[in-house]
Every structure is written in structure tokens, then in C-alpha cells.
Image (cartoon, helix red, strand yellow):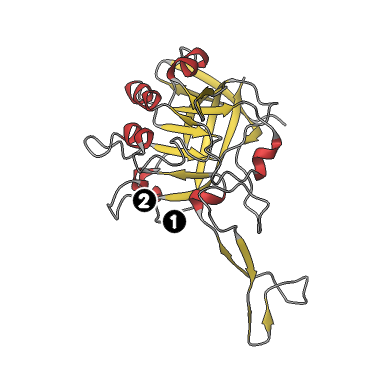
Amino acid sequence: MQKIVQFDRGEQSYKVDLSTPLDISIPLQSGKQNPNCYYATPPSFETIKMDGFIGSVQAGGSCNYRKIAFTPHGNGTHTECYGHIAAHPEATIDRCLKNFWFLAVLITVTPTLQGNDGLITLEHFLEQMPEETVEAVVIRTLPNPTEKLQRQYSGSNPPYLAASIANWLVDRHVVHLLVDLPSVDKEVDGGALAFHKAFWQYPIATREEATITELIYVPDTVIDGLYLLNLQVANIQTDASPSRPVLYRLV
């Protein structure tokens, strides 16, 4: 059954079907069957055992009870706030991300080989951007194999984005960026973090509400264009959280 709702943004009205969600997050699971970057330890789901109790129904326990350990930045789809590059204790994702629905555009870009780097340039980025004003931009890179769901990125110098793209996004008031890469910046850049700093305008005029979501996966069946984005994170006080971005087609 279709669930059609209408929403307005400025003077423009849109309709969306909430019955057909397109989840572009990567499920977090125990072990090495996750994407991994920056040499993060794989997630672990540990069954709790104590005083004759075992937290596994499969092993004879009354319920499942596990301790889960993971690294948000290194183990899968995550959303980060400016606290990723700031020393402010209050710069946490639960405080910065206060709204969860956004008009978004999905574009597909092929990184350009420059020396040993795969770079998404401003020129190629702009070739795919529509004229509509949006709050969020979702970037899918090519090639786009399903192997991305488990790719081990550490030490591989993955593609990244030119910092000039960040400046363009800021000028057009785009506050949420989602990419299928482990980082918007070069894996080893000497701590420059040029894109992060430009996108958040840190520390001069910090855009505290802005977020970057990394390690998404957008299947080839999802076409480029406008969507309604629902961006959800765990309500924890840290700079980054596992997240579940979901797209909804406009009708």
C-alpha cells in the first residue's frame, strides 16, 4: 500500500512515497564481513556469561544478551559532526543533528586519476549536479561493485574529494553530505583534513548543524535524482555514530 505524503520547501511542493524506502546504509555485523578503514578492529558481538547465565538462546539461555564493540569511523556507515576535528566536549552528533528529514540529490561520479590518487574534482562534481536547491547531497562513485559492502580500505589510498567541492556546498547551504568512500579526505594527508575543515568552516564560522556521512552503499538500481532523505543516528554523545540514511523517491 502506498503512503503518499506532501511536503513543502520554500515555495516548492513535493510528494513522496514512504512505502518504498531505499536503505543506503551498510549493516554492521560481527567479524570481518564489514567494510573497514584506518586499521580499525573488526566489530565484535560478545555473548555475556556470568553466574550460570548465558546470553544466547541458541546456547540454551533464556534470552540473547551481548556486548557489542565497534569503531564508528572505521567499521561501516557512520555520520559525523564537526566534533570529529574539534576539541569541544559539546561537539557531539546527538547535539548537532537535530532534524532528520531533508531534500536530497543523488549523483554518480567517477574519480579522476591524478598520479596515484583517485580524485573527485569540482568540475566532474558540477557536471552531475542539478539546478535544484537541496539540503543534502549523496555521492555514489564508480565503479560500484557490491564488494564495497566488505571492502578493506586500510592502506589502499581510496578516492577522495577536492576541497573546492566543500566550498561550493557551503556557498549553496548544503548541510549534509553522504559518500560511499571511507573519508572525504585523502587517507594519509598529514592531518590536513582540508575537506572536513572547509565543509564545517572550522574554526572560524563553524557550521555546527552540518554532517558528513561516510561508507554508505547505493545500489545501481537506485537512479540519480531528487529524493527525500531520512538520516538517523544512535543517540550517543560522541563525534560520530553508526547511522542509517534512507532515501524515498519523489512521485
Q: Is residue 6 left or right of residue 50?
A: left
Disc 1 residue type?
Ile
Residue depicted at x 58% and y 48%: 36
Residue placed under numbered mark 1 in the picture: 236
Position of 155 relative to 56 (above/below)? above
Position of 14 relative to 94 (above/below)? above
Task: Count up the numbered dots.
Answer: 2
Residue depicted at x 43% and y 42%: 188
Residue depicted at x 38% and y 24%: 169
Q: CA distance from mark 1 to mark 2?
A: 8 Å
Position of 72 relative to 56 (above/below)? above
User: Badge 2: how crowded within 10 Å, few (<14), some, or many (20+)?
Assistant: many
> Percent x, y for residue 118?
52, 28
Element class at badge 2: loop
Residue 52 quadrant: bottom right
Element class at badge 1: loop
Residue farthest toward the bottom in the current orientation of the protein = 51
Q: Is residue 117 left or right of residue 142?
A: left
Residues at badges 1 and 2 in contact (C-beta under 8 Å)? yes
Q: Is residue 98 left or right of residue 4?
A: left
Residue 190 quadrant: top left
Position of 13 relative to 233 (above/below)? above
User: Closest to the observer: 125 or 24?
Assistant: 125
> Percent x, y for residue 59?
77, 74
- N-terminal of the pair, mark 1 or mark 2, is 2
> Percent x, y for residue 96?
36, 44
What is the quadrant of the C terminus in the image? top right
> Percent x, y for residue 8?
46, 22
Residue placed under numbered mark 2 in the picture: 92
Disc 2 residue type?
Thr
User: Badge 1: how crowded within 10 Å, few (<14), some, or many (20+)?
Assistant: few
